[in-house]
Amino acid sequence: MSEGRSDVLDGAIAPSDNSALFGHEEAQAFLAAGYRSGKGHHAILIEGPEGIGKATLAFRFANHILSHPEPADAPAEMADPDPGSVVSRQIAAGSSHNVLHLTRPVDEKTGKVKSAITVDEVRRAGRFFAQTSGTGNWRIVIIDPADDLNRNAANAILKILEEPPKRSMFLVLTHTPGRLLPTIRSRCLPLALRPLADADMARALAHLDIRLEGERGARVLAAAKGSVSEALKLVNYGGLDIIDAFDHMLGHPDDAPARREMHKLGDILAAKDSDTIFDFFATLVARHVNAQAKAAGLGGDLAAAERFARLSSELSERLTVADAYNLDRRQTVLSILDDLRTAGAVV
């Protein structure tokens, strides 16, 4: 049971429809063994960076459970889901009465994905359990990711986790577990996933018909840091070009061509349907400024470290305000780049 999504990256396969998972063999074995024992935890906190396969693993495990509803009869290993099976087809279509995918909903007015998972979404879980009570079937809730729960939604989930229904399973995904309520973390069994190794990255991208070759392929692997979604942004959304333009502008702050690049970048990031690459840029800026603050601190330049730390906070707030009030993105980008130049954020 899930709503149609508009935020699956170009070139990606929706996790609910992806029959292949690369890497994470130990995590799969751990989940399969725990389920087969009949003593598995009712809530698994699947931790790790964005884009490494957490959601694909969650749907894969849900498929495993629903395909083998009696733990004692389940196989010792998780096999690739059978795309032709009723269970797989229902999960892929979002029509399974035994799986609820809680994620940021689409705003019906704007057609865009909202910024948070609200308490109204969590209330769907209450109705989900009420409608399926008495069937004896497993009921699986995938929270994707729990980082997006607002405060009221997080408290509502906590109440369900404290008194879980029988034959229920919660698969709670998180990119940054430290941001979750400690009480939610304490009620889940943590399962940490690592970024994909280069060989698994190459296989995962080949599965999406992307071949990494030559110097450009090596750059994608290095910049993606084991994240398939990051690699897709680099390859299919012009992320590498954004990085090159950004680095050139910061390395040559007073160069006329760099100024032209800055305005060109502003136009690209302000274009229609540019949400993905704009978020990529925002993350790039945040990582750069934080790295400058850390380097200054380690180098003993506490004044510079404080300056960059303050700049990081200011830029984060500006991006939040720009998004909330739908401000001109081009002007936002240009003002951010100007602030970086003024701060002396030289690469």
Image (tube, rainbow, N blue to C red):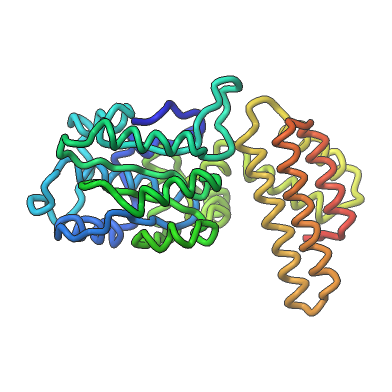
Q: Residue furthest left?
A: 73
Q: Quadrant of residue 275?
A: top right
Q: State the quadrant of the C terminus.
A: bottom right
Residue 212 position (above or below residue 298): above
Q: In the rendered view, does 291 fall on the left or right side of 225? A: right
Q: Position of residue 289 (x, y in %)?
A: 74, 59
Q: Position of residue 279 (x, y in %)?
A: 64, 42
Q: Position of residue 216 (x, y in %)?
A: 57, 48
Q: Quadrant of residue 127?
A: top left
Q: In the rendered view, does 191 fall on the left or right side of 323? A: left
Q: Looking at the image, which residue is at 19% across and 55% down?
A: 35
Q: State the quadrant of the N terminus.
A: top left
Q: Looking at the image, which residue is at 46% across and 38% down?
A: 103
Q: Looking at the image, which residue is at 67% across and 25% down?
A: 272
Q: Residue furthest bottom?
A: 300
Q: Position of residue 47 (x, y in %)?
A: 43, 57
Res. 145 in view: yes
